Image (cartoon, rainbow, N blue to C red):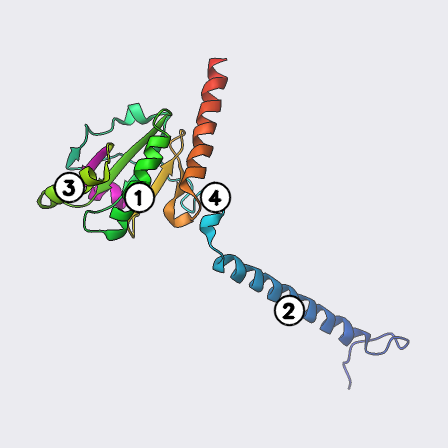
Amino acid sequence: MSHDPVMDPDVPNQFRRDSYSKQIFFFLLSLAIGVAAFAWMASPRSRLPFFGSSQSGLRLPAIEATGWINGLPPDRDALAGKVVVIEVWASWCGPCRKNMPHLVKLHEAFASRDVVFIGLTDEGKGELAEIRKVIETSGVTWSIGWGAMRTTLMLAVDSIPALYVFGADGRLAWSSPDGGDIRTVLEHEVRKAEAKANDKSS
C-alpha cells in the first residue's frame, strides 16, 4: 500500500518542491553567515572601535605585589571613581619593551584627567635591577608592582604584554585580547566618568 503524501493534482510534485526550496534557502543562509563570519575574523580588528570586553563583568581586583617601584601601592579607595589602566609585562619580554614608549605617550595624553596607570610583573627580587633599567630607559613614571602573581592570576593573564582598562564603575571595559584601540576606549571611559561627575555636581 502506498503512503505517499497527498498532493494537489493540479500542482504536480508540490510537496517535494516546497521541501527542496526550504533546504536550498537554509543552505544558502548558512553559507552567507559562514562567509560573513570568516571575513570578520580575517579583518584587522584593531581598526575597529571596541566598547565592552569578552571578560565583561570582571571587577577591578585587589592590586597586590611583593614590592613597588615609582611609588606606593595603589590605594583601593583612591582608585574608586577613576579609570584604571593595568599593564602586565616582564623585563625579558621584547614586545613589552617595545610597547613601553607608546604607553608613556598615552599616559602623558591623559595626565590631566582621572586616569591611573599601574604596571605589574610576576618577576621577583632577582630581576629588580633589570626591571628598574627598563622603566628608567622607557621613561615610565607610574607605579610598577613586582612579584604580582596573585593579581595577574585574577586577571586571567595568558600572554604578555596584556593591557586592561577598568571604567570608573570598577568594571572591566576593555582588554588587549579584545582588539580595538586603547586610546579610543580610554577617551570613551573618561568622558563617561566626567559626564557622571558633572551630573552629580549639578
Kind of element beneath mark 4:
loop
Contact, mark 4 vs mark 3 (Cβ under 8 Å):
no
Secondary structure under tag 3 reads helix
Q: Which span is picked out in magenta?
A: 143-153
Few, some or many residues within 10 Å of mark 3 (<14, 14–19, 20+): few
Q: Amino acid at mark 4?
A: Phe
* Rendered location of residue 152, percent (x, y): 26, 44
Q: Which residue is mark 4?
A: 50
Residue at 28% over, 51% down: 95
Q: Earlier in the sequence, mark 3 or mark 1?
A: 3
Q: Which residue is mark 2?
A: 27
Label 4 near label 1: C-beta < 8 Å?
no
**Mark 3 or mark 2, whichever is nearer to me:** 3
Residue 96: percent from left, percent from top = 26, 48
Question: What's the distance in space between the residues labelled 4 and 3, CA to CA?
Answer: 34 Å
* Residue 77, picture quadrant: top left
Front residue of this view, candidates 158 and 10: 158
